[in-house]
Amino acid sequence: KYHEKLKNITEGDITERCLASWRRHPGEFSVINHGDSWVNNMMFCYDEKGKPRDCKYLDYQLCLYTSPAIDLHYFISTSLADDVIQDMNHLLDFYYIRLLMTLNKLKCNLKQIPSLKEFKDDFRRRSFYGLGTIVTVSSLVKADSRSDATFDEILSPNAPEKGFRYHCYNNNAFKNAVIRLLPIYEKLGVFC
């Protein structure tokens, strides 16, 4: 179903669309993004019942100052469970409320914060970043640990036919993630 739609995207300027999706614009609401926001860069603290009660980020070398939608798309494209992905509106509402609560604790001027609608519109405008993350980063994080898992092997024009690069795009975890995520990103308008 998505073959032609993805093919049409590859015939355009993918790099420019990706850059435009994360680029910061003057006067726009921005936050410090982690830049590599997936579960392996988070450390969780659990209560006695096994429920997470706190989370700390690790690995800060890719931080950038731009829209909060960037880390959200990255996390959604690499780390979310099926049941959470299916309720994107609830996730965005929850994030927005937590963002306001945190900014209020920090005594920030909440009048400068976008409305929930503006926040969701920004998330939608930046959805191409999520698609880019699916086909690049998600393929790597969903891959099994293997001895041939090197960037040289991934980038080599002479990579073995069934090597790590092949595995990245053909393992079941990645294929299932793509099947779940492409309809969501289609609704967000990435194929328009």
Image: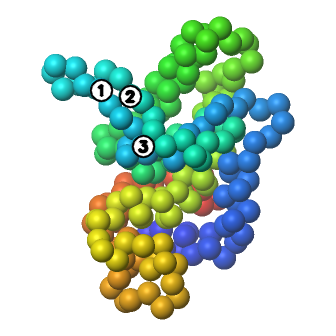
| In front of the other: 36 or 125 | 36
Mark 2–mark 1 CB contact (< 8 Å): yes
For mark 3, give the secondary structure: helix
Residue 84: image tag: none
For mark 1, give the secondary structure: strand
Q: Which residue is mark 3?
A: 41
Quadrant housing residue 179 = bottom left
Q: Give the distance between the C-alpha atoms of the residues marked 2 and 1, in whole angstroms.
A: 6 Å
Residue type, label 1: Cys
As displayed, is residue 57 above or below residue 142? above
Image-based side of 153 in relation to 130, left or right: left
Quadrant housing residue 177 = bottom left
As displayed, is residue 158 above or below residue 50? below
Q: Which residue is mark 1?
A: 45
Q: State the image coordinates of residue 150 (x, y, percent, origin top left).
A: 42, 73
Q: Residues within 10 Å of mark 2 (few under 14, many from 20)?
A: few
Q: State the image coordinates of residue 62 (x, y, percent, origin top left).
A: 59, 47
Q: Residues within 10 Å of mark 1 (few under 14, many from 20)?
A: few
Q: Which residue is mark 2?
A: 55
Q: Earlier in the sequence, mark 2 or mark 1?
A: 1
Image-based side of 38 in relation to 171, left or right: right
Q: Give the distance between the C-alpha atoms of the residues marked 2 and 3, in whole angstroms.
A: 10 Å
In the image, what residue occupies the spot 84% across and 36% down?
Answer: 26
Q: Residues within 10 Å of mark 3 (few under 14, many from 20)?
A: some
Quadrant for the C terminus, please: bottom right
As displayed, is residue 28 above or below residue 126? above
Mark 2–mark 3 CB contact (< 8 Å): no
